[in-house]
Amino acid sequence: MTQHDPPAAALTPPPDAPSTPQQRTVYLDPPAMPPTLFNAIVAPRPIGWISSISPSGEANLAPFSYFNGISSRPPMVMFACNRAPDRASKDTLANLRANGEFVFNFVSRALGAAMNLSSAPLPHGGDEFAFAGLARAPSRVVAPPRVAESPASLECRVLRIVDLDPDETGRTVSSVVIGRVVGVHLRADLVDADGGFDTVAADPIVRMGGTTYGALGDVFQMARPDYP
């Protein structure tokens, strides 16, 4: 058993579990489920690489494991920020509460190492752009800079921050940030003649469980069926 594995008792099949190996299941009470197991199930997840700026003008860059789109009309995104163990608020969340602006930066495979470096616990006010060897590019609508090397960036304004208190002692406070997209930057060679974005060529990486990441595999199309 590794340090990430749940207790053996927590993985005991219920007494009515089918005997066929392909149908066997295990049941877990949520308190017994380690975070890495949850992350491996809710996967793959796009990476929310968020740049923000402090009231004093210091840029911040950090990746977030829980990120996704909400709507395309109007375009909105969300990401969740868990409270840091050593302070009341992570720099990203503090910046967004102060000025309500951020930029989502697309993480390609080529930028994976730099993205990971930007997750290092630098001291307050540390420059993640410089630490990760990344260039800043100016945004057009919002104040925070974007990652110049990113294939796509979405400038966003905060619509709402929802704070979620834990229901048990020892659990983490989470804040869900909802942002409206107010500006879009795309690498020109990834935009096709019809104005579409070539996600395959952009080569995104995604989060899975623990320290595991993934990339695109087989890509196919599936049209929604008509009824009747």
Image: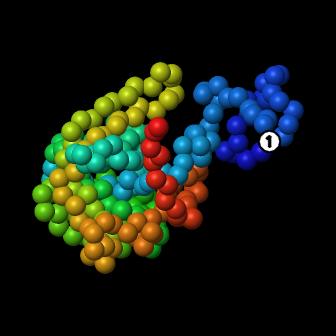
Q: Is residue 149 visible?
A: no
Q: Looking at the image, which residue is at 62% across and 42% down?
A: 37
Q: Looking at the image, which residue is at 50% across and 29% down?
A: 171
**Residue that sits furthest to the left in the current view:** 141
Nearer to the camera, 111 or 90: 111
Nearer to the camera, 60 or 147: 147
Which kind of residue does numbered mark 1 sit on?
Gln
Q: Position of residue 144 (x, y in %)?
A: 20, 58
Q: Position of residue 212 (x, y in %)?
A: 58, 57
Q: Position of residue 102 (x, y in %)?
A: 24, 52
**Residue that sits furthest to the right in the current view:** 19
Q: Is residue 6 above or below residue 44?
A: above
Q: Is residue 43 above or below residue 149?
A: above
Q: Quadrant of the N terminus?
A: top right
**Residue that sits furthest to the bottom in the current view:** 189
Label 1 element class? helix
Nearer to the camera, 44 or 130: 44
Q: Looking at the image, which residue is at 32% across and 61% down?
A: 105
Instruction: Name the quadrant containing residue 98.
Output: top left
Q: In the rendered picture of this protein, how many numbered marks are placed on residues?
A: 1
Residue indicated by mark 1 = 22
Colour pattern of the rendering: rainbow
Instruction: Name the quadrant containing residue 211.
Output: bottom right
**Relative side of 81 to 219, left or right:** left
Q: Is residue 80 above or below residue 10?
A: below
Q: Is residue 70 visible?
A: yes
Q: Looking at the image, which residue is at 18% across and 58% down?
A: 183
Q: Position of residue 95 (x, y in %)?
A: 23, 47
Q: Residues within 10 Å of mark 1 (few under 14, many from 20)?
A: few
**Relative side of 116 to 135, left or right:** right
